[in-house]
Image (spheres, coloured by chain):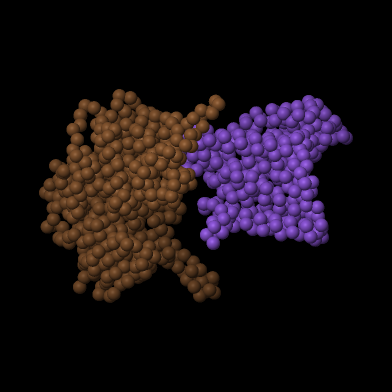
Chain colours: A purple, B brown
Amino acid sequence: MMSIKKTYEKIGFPRLIIIVFIIVLLVAAASLKIPLSGIYSDILIRFGMNAILVLAMVPAIKSGIGLNFNLPLGVIFGLFGALVSMELGLHGWTSLFASLLIAVPLATCGGYLYGLMLNKVKGQEMTVGNYVGFSIVSFMCIVWTIAPFKSPELVWAMGGTGLRTTVSLENTMEKILDNFLSFKLFNVTIPTGLLLSVGLLSFLFWFFTKTKSGIAMEVAGSNENFAVSNGVDVNKERIKGTVLSTVLGAIGIIIYSQSFGFLQLYNAPLYVAMPAVASILIGGATVSHAKISHVLIGTLLFQSVLVIALPVINIISEGSMSEIVRVIVSNGIILYALTRSGGVE
Amino acid sequence: MALLEIKNICKKYGENQVLEDISFKIDQGEILGLLGENGAGKSTLMNILFGMPVIHNTGGYEGEISVDGQNYKPKNPTDAMKFGIGMVHQEFMLIPGFSITENIKLNRENTKSSLTGKLTKSNKLNRLDTKSMKSDADEALKKLDLKIDSLLQVENLPVGYKQFIEIAREIDKTNLKILILDEPTAVLTESEARDFLEIIKTLADFNIAVLFITHRLEEIKSITDNIVIIRDGKLIETAKTADVSIKDMAKLMVGRDISTSRLRKNKQLDDKDIILELDSFSVNMPGEQVKSINLKVRKGEILGIGGLAGQGKVGIANGIMGLYPTTGKIYKGTNRIPVNNPRAALMDSIAFLSEDRKGVGLLLDNSIDLNIAYTSLEIKNEFLKKVGFFNVIDGNKVKSHADKMIEDLDIRCTSSKQNTRFLSGGNQQKVCIARALTLKPDLLLVSEPTRGIDIGAKNLVLETLIKLNEEYNTTIIITSSELAELKQVSDRIAIITEGSITSILTPEDSDEKYGLAMSGKKYEEVTDDEY
């Protein structure tokens, strides 16, 4: 009995519900004769696509600024990097690395400025972040229309100016990571390169949290007064967390896009923050405490629900119910987690 | 027959007996002084009298109270007001954006009937009768001899006036019989306080009984008719004020039944070997301000800092560490340390155990071992190993060090990986001490080390500090609200009142000297002829 109770406590109520929900969906999918091997491949791919965007939440939470609702900031730098690499006419791996090389320094600068701003609005980071995100995305909508990109792949076919809303990556870096070393196991395609890149970034971040600098950032986030009395410059640590989060957002969207096959511009970046927030909260993080395991578990559960629910619900109901279910699940989880933000998980 | 009679009042908070068998009475027009240290039970007694909810939420009280011969058992402050008991609180209970009149008449506004009032048959929706409210307010202010426009906003008034307005509110209540004043002069300047005392006397002439709580003994001496002294929840003395000298009052207030033996042998110290010098040192810590003090601490000394709450004793250590805005000079030996810079203080081998253990002293959601190692890791680059170009935490070293500390200090926990949130107060304090021990500082600042800790753990904490002092010659500045504890461990004890050092005493000095110092007077300065 004790061990059941312990396991229950370790898993936690929200995750238990989602796991049960996934099992119900899987049973339903099987009975509806939906091919499960396709579903498993999809889960792996979508996990890999999203995990880094979710990982971007961790430095923000650890450094004390809470959930980074301003993830669109990093995403925009990532998109910009990818656009420039296409404009330069790069292909394949060169294109991927060039995108990263351009995006990361820009995201570092942007994150730094945003971090300076967050230090002036302590206690309001999540609300402010949300609105900064909206503003930046709207501002970039103007920039995308007037930016001097010339490549015919990027700009509207008619008129010749202004970027398209979705830019195809077919000729540059589509699925370059997904296909790297990929193989089939029981009919399930394993996107090795994609999963390796998630593993590499997770490992690098884990290593960072073990360094003196990483520990200082975590201390500043978990108790500001303690940090000050131990000689830690709290504002600096918060900026560090913001920069890391923004950079991971930029890297995350590049990896997401190569797998997805398109760059989505204009209003699309607005919709990256919510699923990432929902994922890490499902994983068991709170607004003040997060670990890499929360990222991995949360992303896997959240994406599984979506991947399996989509075909199942589309078959058993009229119209596009799956989209509505997705919105209800992700927002419901955010709401649940925010109400418990003060508590200890 | 007495106006207010209190018989055999007892009160427990859980297992803790805070009041035991308190009885006294007040007559009409009498001013009664209630004396006691922090934690003696004064506030609890007042809360009982005023029917504060905290009393009932914690199981009520035993004993009887009668007002004018009627049995009185207040359940809430409204009951107290019905019986004509008013209270002026230590902190102002005024609404800044309201005028003086509105504050005085708050919740007792005069009204004129209006249509909405008639329709709802309730007084709540009647119109305010501003004119009669103003004249009531003016009258109350006049009784206090206060010439001020009663339509001014309270916000912009000087502090002294605010206190008067609180009193005006009480005397405006037509049935006021007993007025309780809880440390009313604490926030006033000397001249304001003098005016204030005059007004109390006038109130007594209106046949209002006044229960006056203060730690300023000279005020008690000058205006009260009788005094009641309580100590550790017990009634020590009821007497006519004229029969007791200020020195005796001080002695009765502080003196303890339990003799606390010294834990420390007296130490030979070199007056020339100064480890820390404060020069016109001021700290702006809210509620604990320090005003331009000078202090020298000798190497190897244990210096106690005592005084009542809110007088500034806690501000000193926080100021040295740079946690609150500080001005003045700090010298560590010959080396001047920049103020407002915690890192510089730590680098100069000064460590601090905060009085706010949970807020400042601990990472509640991190493990015990990280809590113990962190300061040394950050400041002295200990517990790190090189991996490539990076300094990475050495988990094994952190853990083995923590395990050793857990054994040495007898920290009760499931393992060194347990989060400190789940430890008891005593064990949390031991974790903080372990962190300071790990840092091996020259100078250790300790604030309220035994607050919220049971007796057994208390002695262990104090003994650990003494051991640290004797083995490593660490100089310790210990700030505590408990005089007995300071006397047990210190070589000298500085008493802080109103942000300044009143006296520096030895542990052997008499209780009356301590009592006087805490009320802001030096022993030599006090003679009863002044009054």
Whether residue A55 is situated above or below residue B227 in the rendered picture: above
**Residue A127 in view in this figure:** no
Residue B202: x percent and y percent? 24, 59
Q: On the image, which quarter does residue B336 sit in?
A: top left
Classify residue A199 as left or right of residue B9.
right
> Residue at the top extreme?
B334
Closest to the observer, A39 or B195: A39
Name the residue located 59 percent from the left edge and 54 percent from the top edge: A11
Residue B309: x percent and y percent? 30, 48
Residue A270: x percent and y percent? 70, 44
**Total numbered labels placed on residues in the image:** 0
Whether residue B377 is situated above or below residue B117 in the rendered picture: above
Name the residue located 33 percent from the left edge and 38 percent from the top edge: B445
Closest to the observer, A2 or B287: A2
Instruction: Classify the position of the N terminus of chain B by image quarter.
Output: bottom left
> Residue at the front extreme?
A186
Classify residue A155 as left or right of residue B489.
right
Classify residue A156 as left or right of residue B309.
right
Name the residue located 68 percent from the left edge and 36 percent from the top edge: A197
**Residue A341 in view in this figure:** yes
Closest to the observer, A309 or B144: A309
Classify residue A322 as left or right of residue A291.
right
Q: On the image, which quarter does residue B280 sit in?
A: top left
Residue B425: x percent and y percent? 37, 50
Whether residue A202 is situated above or below residue B427 in the rendered picture: above
Name the residue located 25 percent from the left edge and 60 percent from the top edge: B233
Closest to the observer, B77 or B419: B419
